[in-house]
Image (tube, rainbow, N blue to C red):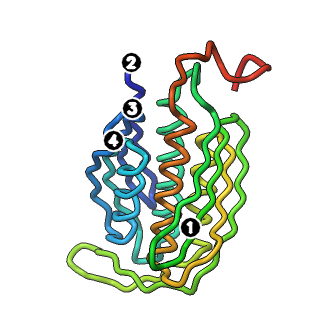
Amino acid sequence: MKQRKSKVWRRTKETDIKLELNIDGRGKSLIDYPIPFMAHMFTLFAKHGLFDLKLMAKGDLEIDMHHLIEDTGLTLGEAFQKALGDKKRIERYGHTILPMDESLAEVQTAIDISGRPHFTFKASFPKELIYAQIVQERVKLYLDAEMLREFFESFVYKAGITLHIDLKRGKNTHHKVEAIFKAFGVALSRACAINPRKKGVPSTKGRL
């Protein structure tokens, strides 16, 4: 089977993002991202989704992290849209419930590669202090649930999928976010999987 790969370069006055994706990978990643916490999340996403992912990004973090995180979602979504191609024989649907040990976080993630962008996000946690690198300067930033919403909404818009994320419970902010990204990777991997029993596009309409 031909591997489903894509390359996307998104360059604006606010961000510069290069991304390479192999849906049929082994979970290998090479992430060069100026926000180490988010770099860790993208690594987890690739690892647990078994996607090969190369990501190099820069952005105007001297303003805030909104532009970079939003544009990363757009770039990743476009990469999946291109790599999925005609979507023939894909499972289309993916779902996972992912616990995080002592954090007691439970994430329910459901995906439909439907061609119809829709996003539901039920998650809350206090702002988390994280760091970013601007040239030689290390700066403080704050990550909150709304910033994650921006990332996933952007991804959904470009990828053309339906995504539901429901964070049930948890006590550690880092682990809550980590559980979300792991569950996202697992559910998306299941939805992208090829089912040899299927023929053509998994829709009575004949297209997705």
Disc marking residue 24: 3
Task: Say what secondary structure mark 1 lies in.
Answer: helix
Q: Quickly name the residue at label 4.
A: 52
Quadrant (top left, top right, bottom left, bottom right) of the N terminus: top left
The amino acid type found where label 4 is placed reads Asp
Q: Marks 1/3: CA distance?
A: 26 Å
Q: Marks 1/4: CA distance?
A: 22 Å
Q: Marks 3/4: CA distance?
A: 8 Å
Crowd rating for badge 2 (residues with CA inside 10 Å; few <14, some 14–19, many 20+): few
Numbered-mark total? 4
Q: Residue at x 58, y 19 (%)?
A: 88
129 relative position to 27: left or right: right
User: Looking at the image, is mark 1 or mark 4 earlier in the sequence?
Assistant: 4
Q: Quickly name the residue at label 2.
A: 2
154 relative position to 116: left or right: left
Residue 174: x and y, percent? 44, 77
Q: Quickly name the residue at label 1.
A: 148
